[in-house]
Amino acid sequence: MNHPVNDPKIVILGMGACGLGAAWRLQELGYTNYKIFERNAYPGGLAYSVTDEMGFTWDIGGHVQFSHYRYFDHLMDLLMGDEWVFHERSSWVWIRDRFVPYPFQNNIRYLAREDIWKCLSGLIELYKHPSLQPKTFRDWILSVFGKGIAELFLLPYNFKVWAYPPEKLSYNWIADRVSVVDLARIIENILFERDDVSWGPNNRFRFPLKGGTGEIWKRLYERLDHSRTYLTHEVVRVDTKKRLVAFDNGRQEPYDALITTLPLDRFLLLSDLEERSAAEKLVHSSTNIIGIGLKGQPPEHLKTKCWMYFPESNCPFYRVTVFSNYSPFNTPDPKQYWSLMAEVSESCDKMVKHEAISREVIEGALNTRLITNREAIVDLWFHHEPYGYPTPTLQRDEALRVLLTLEELAIFSRGRFGGWKYEVSNQDHSLMQGVEAVNRILLNQEELTLWNPHKANLGGN
């Protein structure tokens, strides 16, 4: 990409992981011709944390720290030093009135015999009659896992987490996000009664000792040159012809190169681009976070668990984190309190009544034995996040061709919702998208994460 000047003025929109990563990289390179703007009064984006009036700390979702990048790991070490709590993942699926270790398909031995056979017979049928090339995520699930595992767990769970039917989704995003099936391994686990829980890049993770996930990004923000950082600046218009960003307070900021982490659909609608119609093809779900602070200590069956998945209809949440297990400082006093954090997805295909959701979550927690009585609840926290997950619909990749058009205008839309690729939307991915965008603009280096998610997720970068 050719810039109109040798010393391009770079404007960054958003102080989530991606925007902060871009600013950090600029500062690391000693580059000073930039400014970064954030609409909120605090940094962190979707990775900020809240400590409520009761003294309980909550994240906006079940964030954990693991990485595919040495650069990210080194930065985390620099920011937090030894202020981490380290964990071996203990994740489970609550199904058929019992806990099954995750990944579910590798641990079906925990099920009743009839359910084990339902899962196995579906897999055997696939070996006898392989499926045709799948067209949708639903097709892919059935063709890889068989009818038994699909109907028992994967189809209902994926509707709960995505808030859209799996037949509306593609499967190109999967990469390392879903553990596929090895029939011999499954049978061996059943016969030898062996747990199989080590799969996945997040089988070991760390979490900040104090302040929740948001503490990381708060510290990164504090290390930036604050003469170049601007909070409470919301974008209202982007003039791509004049290369000018207008904010709600009347400020106008020119740029030579623009790194935007705004949700891509919102950015297009705020711009003067002809490609605005692509925004209609970009789909996302919202997330509702419900924190439950409880007196006492976690029950025995939750004392070592990290998070749990819930595919069934007797609860509204798809995932619950025993958040007090991540760090003792996530509660006002670990000797007196513990906490759960539930996530409920929402979309036009899966509506949620916000005024009722906290009550429904409590009912679901009782139904699934996470809590035994309401009297133990001392704190209830609710947060609605309009942009929760970028949804990999069948039309997504066609819509994302607009990203190439933006680059011709020196606009780099990056991050969880700027790039709109769920498969590279974790904190490490998002930060690196910001770093790589800077390297592209100033050093003419190729970007890996956004354009080659599979290679990025192989690790060792």
Image (cartoon, rainbow, N blue to C red):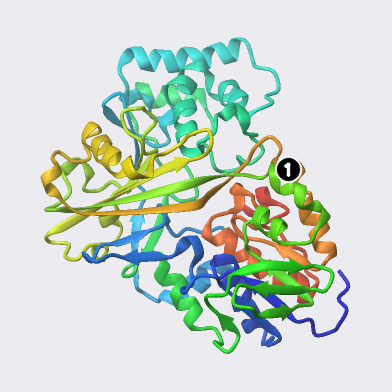
Q: Residue at x 79, y 49 (%)?
A: 401
Residue 2 appears left or right of 116: right
Crowd tier of the residue under label 1, counting other residues whose Cα lies within 10 Å: few below 14, some 14–19, many 20 or above: some
Quick check: 31 above or below 269?
below
Nearest the eye: 392 or 357: 357
On the image, the x and y values in percent for residue 447 come to: 73, 62
Q: Residue at x 54, y 67 (%)?
A: 16
Residue 39 in sight: yes
**Viewport quadrant of the N terminus:** bottom right
On the image, the x and y values in percent for residue 110 come to: 31, 25
Q: Residue at x 28, y 65 (%)?
A: 52
On the image, the x and y values in percent for residue 255 come to: 76, 78
Residue 20 appears left or right of 58: right
Quick check: 53 above or below 120?
below
Badge 1 is on which residue? 397
Residue 460 appears left or right of 64: right
Q: Amino acid at mark 1?
A: Asp
Quick check: 227 above or below 374?
below
